[in-house]
């Protein structure tokens, strides 16, 4: 069983998706063209930014943003220690140094207190110049923008919002991907807004940055295809993917309402037995994942086994922090005091096709696996030694 039931979603939107794809096939324009430009306008309007530039994937989106700002050797970029690898990887790719920062215990997003501590430590050491803070909208909830923005203003740093998991989420009246000086997202199929392949986008209100990114993503293009004015890369969104995304974007708000309903029901049924995710006041999550916390590895494994017998898939998110990744060993500017914790995320069906009996069945499975006493103890002891996640999804039988 898939974490996101893309087959079911396609069945619901089949006629519209097929129609849009057929238009692309008939027109014969498979790179760029009207569907891509239309999608970029619609995405910018949805998140509330002036400009959107599409690209090949979410990783390229991050790298293009860093290249736009000329981030490179000698620069420090502050990233949360608990995130997908590409957040730190792209920093290293442009030659800068990723400085890993600890996370908040409730949202798993970057900790403002630890962030400022990391910036001060870096400045005191004098080996690197602080340039950028990357705030990740982990699991669908936007990062603590208000506090991070104060820190960025204080130390004159850029904010780059990694909204790969947060597209569709909100902080007050602002959408995810409208919070950073530049914001990025991913359209990988499992994301809240996913295409049928790879895709990504960059958002900004700065026209000069928009023009530079538009050039960088096409080999540093100047006035024409064969006029190259800067060193860039090849990162374009396929036209067929744009056609799919146009349909799915129109349905996204409806899906977010459904997934929030089921998230509330999950929390209602499980809150007395495991540590459920926290969504702070003024925030709305797009629920890329629904995550629960368990006490230790053995409890997690028992739950995974029980859920497996019920046809519920599980997955560890993330098994390692950035400071534990061998590829990043050379970067010694680490400020993490936490080590990966025992976490068990429950992931949603993309369109919320869940029924109450399935949620109750999950609750019963969890109780059998860990026992009431252990579960209550797990609520008191949130953090242990390893980040151990398990993801689940339910759908109608």
Image (spheres, grey):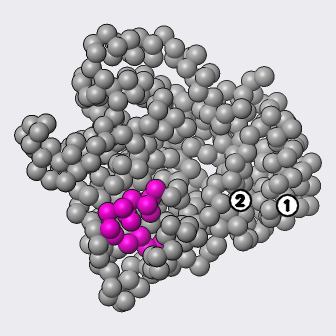
Left or right, residue 374 beside residue 248: right
Local packing at callout 2 (Cα closer than 10 Å; few below 14, some 14-19, many 20+) is many
- Residue 173's spot in the image, x, y percent? 40, 45
- Residue 338's spot in the image, x, y percent? 62, 74
Magenta highlight range = 86-102
Residue placed most toward the observer, 162 or 241: 241
Outermost front residue? 226
Quarter of the image for residue 234 reads top left
Q: Which mark is residue 388?
A: 2
Quarter of the image for residue 57 reads top left
Local packing at callout 1 (Cα closer than 10 Å; few below 14, some 14-19, many 20+) is few
| Residue plotted at (82% across, 30% down) | 357
- Report how far apart the C-alphas of labels 1 and 2 lie in the structure: 10 Å
Say if the magenta span includes residue 99: yes
- Residue 386's spot in the image, x, y percent? 70, 67
User: Which SS class for mark 1?
Assistant: helix
Disc 1, disc 2: CB below 8 Å?
Answer: no
Task: For residue 376, say whether it is visible.
Answer: no
| Residue plotted at (33% across, 55% down) | 63
User: Which SS class for mark 2?
Assistant: loop
Q: Is residue 164 above or below residue 21?
A: below
| Residue plotted at (77% across, 37% down) | 312
Left or right, residue 216 beside residue 97: left
Q: Is residue 151 above or below residue 168?
A: below
Identify the mark nearer the N-term, 1 or 2.
1
Residue at image mark 1: 298
Residue placed most toward the observer, 49 or 196: 196
Left or right, residue 250 beside residue 362: left
- Residue 276's spot in the image, x, y percent? 71, 53
Say if the magenta span includes residue 65: no
- The quadrant of the image that shows the N terminus is top right
């Amino acid at each position: 069983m898939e974490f996101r039931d893309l087959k079911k979603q396609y069945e619901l939107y089949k006629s519209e998706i097929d129609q849009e794809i057929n238009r692309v096939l008939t027109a014969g324009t498979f790179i760029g063209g009207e569907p891509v430009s239309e999608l970029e306008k619609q995405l910018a309007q949805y998140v509330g930014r002036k400009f959107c530039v599409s690209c090949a994937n979410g990783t390229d989106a991050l790298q293009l943003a860093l290249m736009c700002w000329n981030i490179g050797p000698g620069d420090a970029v502050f990233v949360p220690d608990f995130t997908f690898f590409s957040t730190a990887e792209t920093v290293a790719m442009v030659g800068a140094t990723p400085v890993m920062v600890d996370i908040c215990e409730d949202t798993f997003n970057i900790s403002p207190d630890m962030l400022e501590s990391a910036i001060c430590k870096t400045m005191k050491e004098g080996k690197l110049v602080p340039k950028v803070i990357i705030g990740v909208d982990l699991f669908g909830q936007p990062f603590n923008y208000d506090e991070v923005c104060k820190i960025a203003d204080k130390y004159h740093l850029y904010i780059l919002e990694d909204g790969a998991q947060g597209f569709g989420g909100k902080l007050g009246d602002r959408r995810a991907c409208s919070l950073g000086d530049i914001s990025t997202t991913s359209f990988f199929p499992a994301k809240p807004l996913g295409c049928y392949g790879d895709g990504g986008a960059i958002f900004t209100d700065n026209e000069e940055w928009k023009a530079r990114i538009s050039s960088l993503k096409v080999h540093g293009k100047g006035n024409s295809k064969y006029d190259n004015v800067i060193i860039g890369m090849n990162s374009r969104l396929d036209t067929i993917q744009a056609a799919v995304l146009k349909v799915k974007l129109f349905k996204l708000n409806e899906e977010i309402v459904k997934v929030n309903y089921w998230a509330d029901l999950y929390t209602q049924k499980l809150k007395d037995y495991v540590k459920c995710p926290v969504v702070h006041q003024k925030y709305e999550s797009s629920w890329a994942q629904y995550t629960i916390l368990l006490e230790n590895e053995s409890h997690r494994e028992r739950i995974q086994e029980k859920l497996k017998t019920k046809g519920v898939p599980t997955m560890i998110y993330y098994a390692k922090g950035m400071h534990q990744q061998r590829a990043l060993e050379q970067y010694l500017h680490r400020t993490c005091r936490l080590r990966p914790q025992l976490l068990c995320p429950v992931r949603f069906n993309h369109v919320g096709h869940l029924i109450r009996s399935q949620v109750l069945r999950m609750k019963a499975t969890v109780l059998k696996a860990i026992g009431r006493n252990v579960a209550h103890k797990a609520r008191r002891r949130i953090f242990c030694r390893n980040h151990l996640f398990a993801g689940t999804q339910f759908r109608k039988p």
